[in-house]
Image: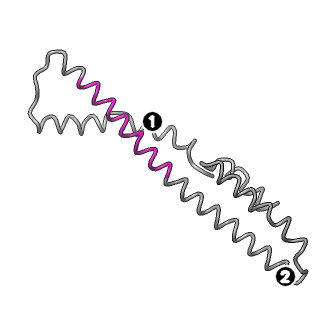
Amino acid sequence: DLVGGAHNKTITLLHMESWRTEMKEEINRINQVLPNTPADEKTATIKQWVDSVIDKMDHYKAAHHRYVKQALTLLELALWKAKLAEKEENSAEGRTKKVKLDSESVRKEKRVTCGADTVIRNILPYLQLE
């Protein structure tokens, strides 16, 4: 119950349903193993089980972190692309083409001003595991 209770909220936040199912099965596994374990081996069996649950949770947390990082990178690129599209629409309204160097500086400026830092800062708390 201690391991299940401590990790229950984190398990519900895991990215993949298969991860959640596997973690719940691993936590419940002790109920099948412990009754058939000799009394002198119960402590070692529980320790091994707790270590297994923690190791599996750490693995899934790391994978979740990688997925969140990839998703945030894609979100930043999408926001930057949308900001560049706004610029192109404004340019199409009669502005002349700028030199390549100026275009690169405009792209860099649009990356900074696309608002990705604000959007990411506001959605990241919903994507993090506790």
Under mark 2, the amino acid is Glu
If the image is split into quadrants, where does the N terminus sit? Answer: bottom right
Quarter of the figure with residue 23: bottom right
The way the protein has been coloured in the rendering is: one colour
Foreground residue among 19 and 68: 19
40 falls in the magenta region: no
Point out the frontmost of discs 2 and 1.
2
Q: Secondary structure at mark 2?
A: helix
Under mark 1, the amino acid is Val
Tag on residue 41? 2
Q: Count neighbours of disc 1 (C-alpha within 10 A) and say few if under 14, some if 14 to 19, many if 20 or more.
A: some
In the image, residue 24 sits, relative to residue 73, either above or below, namely below
**Residue at the disc numbered 1:** 119
Find the magenta span and give its range: 67-88
Q: Secondary structure at mark 1?
A: helix
Quarter of the figure with residue 72: top left
